[in-house]
Image (cartoon, helix red, strand yellow):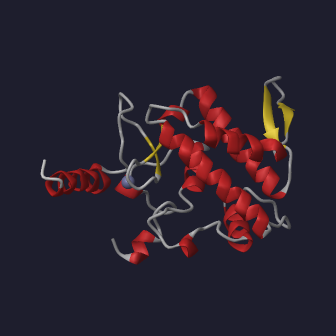
Amino acid sequence: MEERDKRRVGEQIEPGGRPKAPGRLELLQRFINSYNHDFPPDWDRIGTGEKAQAWLREKGLLAPGEQISDADALRLCKLREALRALVVANHGGEPDAEAAEIIRKLSRVALFRAAIDDEGRVGLEPAGHGADGAVATLLGIVSEAQVRGDWVRMKACRQCEYAFFDRSKNRSAAWCSMSICGNRTKNRAYYRRRSSGT
Ligand SMILES: [Zn+2]
């Protein structure tokens, strides 16, 4: 893949060309995909206060005039990696209690208020500002997806750990793309077997 295309992955294009997650879950997918360990650290879209501020504002997660410090960006990166661990765990197997604990700690700043529409339907909306408000919005999206039952389809590729939405009937997708990461994994296993002589 060319560098120009690589830089677009997670924003304009998805790894493996999969369709994006539905509804507001797409925003959470973008958040997790704001960085990938395959890329240099300075490609992190929320790696500094300045970058995180621009990214959050562009996504409507930050009101005009609200600011993000480097410490806020660090918190957001921690949240992102813990959410990534949760969606990795959505493949089945052990739930990630350590990631849940990190999110529990980071969620202490997340405030919600009851919002009641004209038909009397009650919802929860984020009440905080700045990074705290963004954390609340992101956690609200997770909660919504869990209630709706979509959350189990939010996964991270077993190879590259990009977040993707599994639309397969039996929720069996393991890789962002069989032709890219699926084969990378298979080739690695093949060479391992060959070099170990089995
Ligand atoms: Zn992948």
Q: Is 185 in front, or is 181?
A: 185
- Give the quarter of the image for residue 144: top right
108 above or below 74?
Answer: above
Point out the residue furthest to the top here.
120
17 above or below 113?
Answer: below
Count of marks placed on residues: 0
Q: Which residue is drawn at 73% across and 73% down?
A: 50
Ligand 1: which quarter? Answer: bottom left
Q: Residue at x 60, y 46 (%)?
A: 83
Q: Is 50 in front, or is 39?
A: 39
- Give the quarter of the image for residue 98: top right
Q: Residue at x 42, y 39 (%)?
A: 166
Q: Is 8 in front, or is 122?
A: 8
Do we see residue 27 in this rendering? no
Q: List x then y, in percent, for residue 22.
A: 53, 41
Q: List x then y, in percent, for residue 109.
A: 83, 47
Q: List x then y, in percent, for residue 101.
A: 69, 40
178 relative to 3 in the view: left or right:
left
174 relative to 52 in the view: left or right:
left
Q: Is 113 in front, or is 94?
A: 94
Q: Quadrant of the N terminus?
A: bottom left
Do we see residue 88 in this rendering? yes
Q: List x then y, in percent, for residue 103.
A: 69, 43
